[in-house]
Amino acid sequence: MNKRITLKDVAAHAGVSRATASLVVRDAGQLTDATRERVRKAMDSLGYVYHRGAASLRATQTRTVGLVVPEISNPFTAEYVIGLETEFAERDVIVLLSNAYESSTRQETVVRLLMEQQVDGLIVTPALGSSERFISNLASSGIPVVISIRPVEDQSLPYVGTDNLRGGELAGAHLASHGVRSVAYIGGFEGLGPRAARVEGVARGLAQAPRRGRVVADIAGPATGRFGYEATSRLLATNSLPDGVVCHNDTVAFGLYRALRALAPERVERIHVIGFDNVDEAALWEPPLTTLAVNGREVGRLTANALARRILDKHGAPERVLLTPELVVRRSCGHQYTTNYLDEVQK
């Protein structure tokens, strides 16, 4: 059996002390670039692998964080995870990702398992039906926790997310500027804070117009293309689809347009539609989709930074970070695109 290469072996090979070699692997201390390079070459030559587990016992940190999301298949969530992991990678921290599948029961299980792994901190986007007890247990767990994307009532936990109320207002006001006075809101599960804030915001935006508009159809459900298709089909069947629609995300809007093309193609260019998230496909859709740009990668990056600060200062005042969405106007609601919209896609 081959002998495991130790840090002492690396130090001897590089001609430095073990303490100096330790500073190099931990990227710490005041060492010259030449010394660091000599130690790294020795590590490569000997095939040394840093024993993170043993180091964590000494440093009382595992350099891992737990991330629990309700549904990884959502395009926004995917962008969010990329931003978060990229930020932590720069800190040499590994993200342990768990999907709760929108189940509060599974969420409690994976949070417990992550805590058993001695993660340095937790980021949780609460699943539908998360109990006050669950949130309270997180707050009193003794481990740094940040709530992200979906806010909770417990103000003792840091929160990073999007200003959904303002996003809804922007959507409602824009529809009103086109003379739309009746709007349907489609998608998103009933009881989710972001959805309620967006619906309220849309109503506020519509009410700001000289001729007050209102939300006449509020259809809750999965934020999927299939649900967008089904909800739109039901509205068409009852002749109750208004001239303006706000979709909970861009994917729902894609399903809406699929239904229109199949069942009422004459309305494709007449209806005013706004989505949320501004996924890459939104600009490529036909018609190109007006949407509220919610920068998932930026939300992820800011969430990672918030947890890093919380780990360093567990007893500091909990911060609250809200990003304001940006209305990106395209042909689905108010902008006649020419071929230069391709410039946007290529950015």
Image: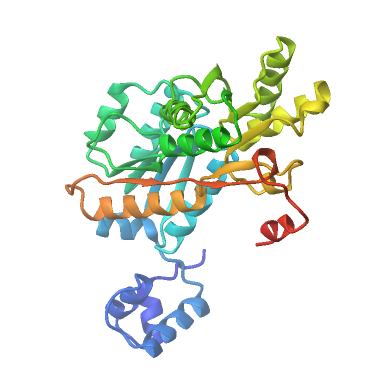
Residue 37 position, x and y percent, is 43, 85
From the viewer's perspective, is 143 left or right of 207? left
Seen as rendered, the residue at the extreme front is: 210
> Residue at the spot x=70%, y=34% of the render?
254
Q: Is residue 170 above or below residue 271?
A: below
Between residues 268 and 302, which one lies in front from this camera angle?
Answer: 268
Quarter of the rendering occupied by the C terminus:
bottom right
Q: Is residue 229 above or below residue 145?
A: above
Q: Report whether residue 308 is seen.
A: yes
Residue 89 position, x and y percent, is 46, 60
Q: Report whether residue 13 is seen.
A: no
Seen as rendered, the residue at the extreme left is: 315
Q: Is residue 293 above or below residue 245?
A: below
How was the colour assigned to the protein in this rendering? rainbow
Residue 6 position, x and y percent, is 39, 70
Between residues 191 and 329, which one lies in front from this camera angle?
Answer: 329
From the viewer's perspective, is 139 left or right of 209? left
Between residues 212 and 287, which one lies in front from this camera angle?
Answer: 212
> Residue at the spot x=82%, y=27% of the render?
265
> Residue at the spot x=30%, y=78% of the render?
18
Between residues 253 and 169, which one lies in front from this camera angle?
Answer: 169
Q: Is residue 53 above or below residue 115?
A: below
Residue 251, located in which quarter of the rendered image? top right
Q: How many marks?
A: 0
> Residue at the spot x=59%, y=45% of the render?
278
